[in-house]
Image (cartoon, rainbow, N blue to C red):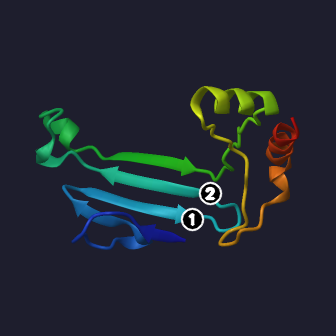
Amino acid sequence: MARRVGGQGGRQQPGGLRGRGHGERSALCDNKATGVTLAVLTWSPDITSAHCDEKEFQKRTTIAVVQVEPKACEQKMETLSASEIGKGLDANGRVAIYGIRFDTNKADIQPASKASRDQIGALLKQ
């Protein structure tokens, strides 16, 4: 499925391409099954090109295609040991502890938080 990209006032073209002036056309093509999106941009330098004023160059059309694939974000949170938490508290009076995860819009702590909770518990038992 193609959908328009950016710009106001452009003319809708066949295939979902939309113009933004100066010979520019753009579209996003989504593949719902794979989650992949293709971004397609075409443009002609026209007489507005700041890069080259040669007549032959101004007759050409450039096409750029970018494939965007979804990818899960990497989670690289390190769990502080009980001794590291204690050292931070002794030195600064505070320590940042990452890895405590909550359910969305709830106060329920997720099981994935176990490592950090265990280290906090170990510190409190010292």
Q: CA distance from mark 2 to mark 1?
A: 6 Å
Q: Residues within 10 Å of mark 1 (few under 14, many from 20)?
A: some
Residue 75 locus on image (x, y percent)? 71, 43
**107 vs 24, nearest the viewer:** 107
On-image quarter of the C terminus: top right
Q: Is residue 63 above or below residue 36?
A: above
Query: Would you identify the image quadrant in which residue 102 lies?
Result: bottom right
**93 vs 81, nearest the viewer:** 93
| Residue shown at 74% from the left, 35% from the top | 78
| Residue shown at 63% from the left, 40% from the top | 96
Q: Is residue 124 above or below residue 43?
A: above
Marks 2,1: beta carbons within 8 A? yes
Q: Is residue 52 above or below residue 102?
A: above
Q: In terms of secondary structure, where does tag 1 sit? A: strand
Q: Amino acid at mark 2?
A: Val
Q: Is residue 38 left or right of residue 126?
A: left
| Number of the label disc, if any, that sits on residue 59 | none
| Residue shown at 87% from the left, 39% from the top | 122
Q: Residues within 10 Å of mark 2 (few under 14, many from 20)?
A: some
Residue 105 locus on image (x, y percent)? 65, 72
Residue 28 locus on image (x, y percent)? 47, 62
Query: Would you identify the image quadrant in which residue 101 lies?
Result: bottom right
Give whichever of discs 2 and 1 has the lower sequence position.
1
Q: Amino acid at mark 1?
A: Asp
Residue corresponding to mark 1: 30
Q: Is residue 77 left or right of residue 9?
A: right
Residue corresponding to mark 2: 36
